[in-house]
Amino acid sequence: MKLLWHSRLGSGAGGHLDCRDSRRDARLPHGLEACATTAAVAVLLLLHGETFGEELIPTGKGMAWRYNMTEEVGKGLRVPDVKPDADGKIRLPVLYRDEGPENVDGKELLKFEMHRAGMITNTDLLTIDEHGIICWARINVDGEFVKFNPPQTMIAMPLKKGANWNFDGQAGDLNVHQHYEVTGEENIEVPAGEFRAFRIHGEQTSPSPMTIDRWFAIGTGIVKDVTAMRATNGDLLQRISLELAERPRVTDRPEVKPDAAPKKLSVSLSSERFGKPTTTFSSGTPQIYARWQGHRLRKGAKVRAVWIAENIGDDAPPDYKVDEASAIAESPTTPGVFTLSRPDDGWAIGDYRAEFYVDDVLVETVKLRIVK
């Protein structure tokens, strides 16, 4: 059985990979986000301080902000282990909680945890002074310590209409460029009530396109945030919205489940690039698309898919390795597609599976059938 399996990464990425030459890797366009720009970063502004003589937000260990999170992903992508609503959006409550001060390398930083579905998605380490709100480092869901160089300004003081600032630096080994501007003040209504808030608009150009719109109310904190991440061709990859569900108050730390961490990779199969997922294909299907979405990948991680014929009768021995393809991820949430083209003599009817590896560790297996 002679097949051609090639790979396409991201939305609109060019070039195919002939996987009969296993030495070649398809190179990706820049990925979805830097560590400094996840949706969780939106609430990095929830710190203490004073502006115009008024407390910026309430403070103290255990002080917490509850949000309603709405997540939507681009066509053909999905979030693992979470079932979307009828409109295709994922809705979950999240909690951002002050864990008090922590000494890091001799410097006292403020520690905030983002809790979602029984896990801590990130821990932010920050300071606040007359210059504003500064993020020095972050601990991600895998426990990796990511340092910002230089420290990243999240809010530049004084907070007023027309204020603007840039971040040109590194988040770990990623180069990041962002620009923020306070566009004005406006009234906004969220589940927690109506607030008078500063609206802050952010644009990221590196390592990938992203926009951030935040509404910050003095005395409360972030009341709304909308972060949209796009592929290099402009297609939407992910949009995450946060709306304050109740006013901040002291609360107990949520239970953290050791097995709640999300998968590093989610995958689906389809007969079309953006078609409905399926695991049954006819013998005449021209191409089978193995779509994958990274969630916790390191930069430079190798994503590899192996196509195996489990039982196709006399055409091949059991568990016969037919072909494989690989690609290199350039961000934690890089998407991609491996495409398997129909052999000249057609698909052999029987049982198959596609194995997905990250850095040679098996992370996902999808079984499928070829029928007449």
Image: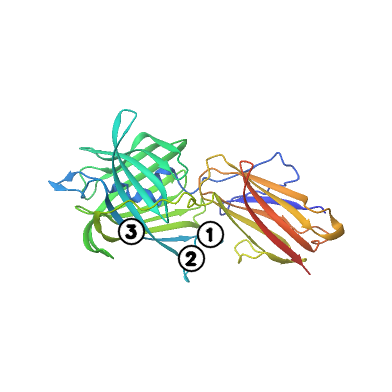
Q: Residues within 10 Å of mark 2 (few under 14, many from 20)?
A: some
Disc 1: CA contacts within 10 A as few (<14), some (14-19) or many (>=20): many
For marks 2 and 3, give the CA distance. Answer: 18 Å
Quadrant, the N terminus: bottom right
Closer to the observer: label 1 or label 3? 3
Residue 131 picture location, percent across and down: 23, 37
Mark 2 / mark 1, whichever is N-terminal: 1
Confirm or deny contact between disc 2 and disc 1 (CB under 8 A). yes
Residue 170 appears in view: no
- Looking at the picture, how far across and down is residue 149, in whole percent? 38, 33
Q: CA distance from mark 2 to mark 1?
A: 9 Å
Point out which mark residue 84 bears: 2
The residue type indicated by label 3 comes to Tyr
Q: Earlier in the sequence, mark 1 or mark 3?
A: 3
- Give the image quarter of residue 283: bottom right
What coloring was used for the rendering? rainbow
Circle 1 residue: 78
Give the residue furthest to the right: 314
Question: Residue 38 in the image: x percent, y percent?
Answer: 41, 49
Q: Amino acid at mark 1?
A: Arg
